[in-house]
Image (tube, grey):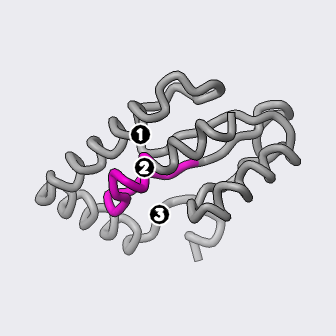
Amino acid sequence: RPFIYTTAPSQHSVASIGCAFDFLTSNIQLQQSLNHKIRHFLHGAEGLPNRTNSFSAIQTFIIPGNKAIRLAAQHLQQKGFDVRPILSPTVPKGTERLRICLHTHNSDGEISSLTQTLRSMV
């Protein structure tokens, strides 16, 4: 009953987080692989307008307007990319964006194709 109105994580959640940290600690190559994917994406996206400055696995491109960002995401999805729009009011009006999540399972070819497709949309 004391956990009904609390935001404290459950014991299961804490244990899961601990296991995830143990897994990542013993699989450094996954972190290195993801860092390579991020660098590859950043190199391919260099000079593209409206790219937010991020060195993480989550990349965003601002395309103002809910309609415009939906159309951009739809175009990328039709090309086979699982890219999602972030619409206002989730973000302030005029800063709607594409959310791109890079993963270790993405190939360099997929990342290159994504950045080329983004370039063709500019």
Residue 72 picture location, percent across and down: 74, 48
Residue 106 picture location, percent across and down: 37, 59
Q: Residues within 10 Å of mark 3 (few under 14, many from 20)?
A: few
Please identify, in this view, whether the residue under mark 3 or under mark 2 is nearer the observer: 2
Against 12, residue 26 (above or below) is above
Q: Residue 111: which numbered mark, if any?
A: 2
Q: Would you identify the image quadrant in which residue 30 lies?
A: bottom left
Report, in whole angstroms, how far the alpha carbon at label 1 lies from the one at label 3.
34 Å
Proximity of marks 1 and 3: CB atoms separated by less than 8 Å: no
Report, in whole angstroms, how far the alpha carbon at label 3 lies from the one at label 2.
36 Å
Against 90, residue 53 (above or below) is above
Element under disc 3: loop
| 111 part of magenta stretch | yes
Q: Please, which residue is most extreme toward the left here?
A: 26
Q: Earlier in the sequence, mark 2 or mark 1?
A: 1
Q: Which residue is pictured at 24% across the width and 67% down the height?
A: 19
Q: Residue 9: which numbered mark, if any?
A: 3
Report, in whole angstroms, how far the alpha carbon at label 2 lies from the one at label 1.
6 Å
Q: Earlier in the sequence, mark 3 or mark 2?
A: 3
| 75 part of magenta stretch | no
Residue range of the region highlighted in magenta in the rendering: 100-112
Q: Which residue is pictured at 33% across the width and 51% down the height?
A: 108
Q: Earlier in the sequence, mark 1 or mark 3?
A: 3
